[in-house]
Amino acid sequence: MPRMNSVAQAVANEEQIIIAADVTPQANDKRQVVPMVEQSTENLQAAGVDEKIGAFDADTGYFSEENVSYLEGEQIDPHISTERLKHHEKIPLAPKGRIPKDLTAKQRMARKLRTKKGRETYAKRKGMIEPIFGQIKQARGFRQFLLRGMDKMRGEWRLVCLTHNLLKLFQSRQAAIA
């Protein structure tokens, strides 16, 4: 029997609190921007948070012209990489002067990420979402789903994310007390 590949998704804030989590059978992340933003918005509203999502930082797997257009339409500032860089590679600086009007959405995004503000905003991603997956995989040993079926895997992933959030909140409270 063929085995279904699944991809865990998460959206987090700057404090590494997961605000949306899902599992999808789609290996391509491009289709996950809209559902994850919608889930994030619903979860924030349900928690009584009035603040809107200000920015969306993501790696190259999430880039598409449609995703950039959607995020801008939702008044969310997109910072999505347009190319995969090697670990030692640095993003080149943006050219000086006005942005030419004939650039594609991909070229505009690449140029945006080369600006000082773009580099700073995109760099936050490394300290927000990447450590979450590292902590869940390495420190907690969650490397594969134990349950089968999309609904069960989704429940398992959300439970893992919930316990991650509880640990983060507990640790931040302990640090505030100390």
Image (cartoon, grey):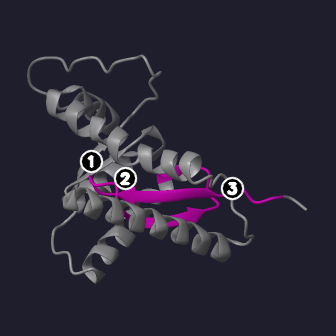
Look at mark 2 in the image and give the residue it sits on.
Answer: 67
174 relative to 128, above or below = below
Amino acid at dot 3: Gln
Mark 2–mark 3 Cα distance, whole angstroms, equals: 29 Å
First-in-chain label (2 vs 1) = 2
Q: Residue at x 43, y 29 (%)?
A: 83
Residue count near mark 2 (Cα–Cα under 10 Å), binned few <14, some 14–19, many ≥20: some
Mark 2–mark 1 Cα distance, whole angstroms, equals: 9 Å
Q: Quadrant of the N terminus?
A: bottom right
Query: In the image, 167: left or right of 77?
Result: right
The image shows residue 112 at horizontal and vertical percentages of 22, 33
Look at mark 1 in the image and give the residue it sits on.
Answer: 78
Query: In the image, 27: left or right of 82?
Result: right
First-in-chain label (1 vs 3) = 1
Q: Quadrant of residue 41?
A: bottom left
How many tags in the picture? Answer: 3
Amino acid at dot 2: Asn
55 relative to 23, above or below = above
Q: Nearer the viewer, mark 2 or mark 3?
A: 3
Q: Nearer the viewer, residue 96 or 91?
A: 91
Q: Nearer the viewer, residue 154 or 30?
A: 154
**Contact (Cβ within 8 Å) of mark 2 with mark 1:** yes
Q: Quadrant of residue 23?
A: bottom right
Find the residue positioned furthest to the front.
178
Q: Residue at x 44, y 51 (%)?
A: 132
Q: Judge whether residue 67 is colored magenta.
A: no
> Which span is picked out in magenta?
3-30
**Quick one: SS at disc 1?**
strand
Find the residue positioned furthest to the right.
1
**Quick one: SS at disc 3?**
loop
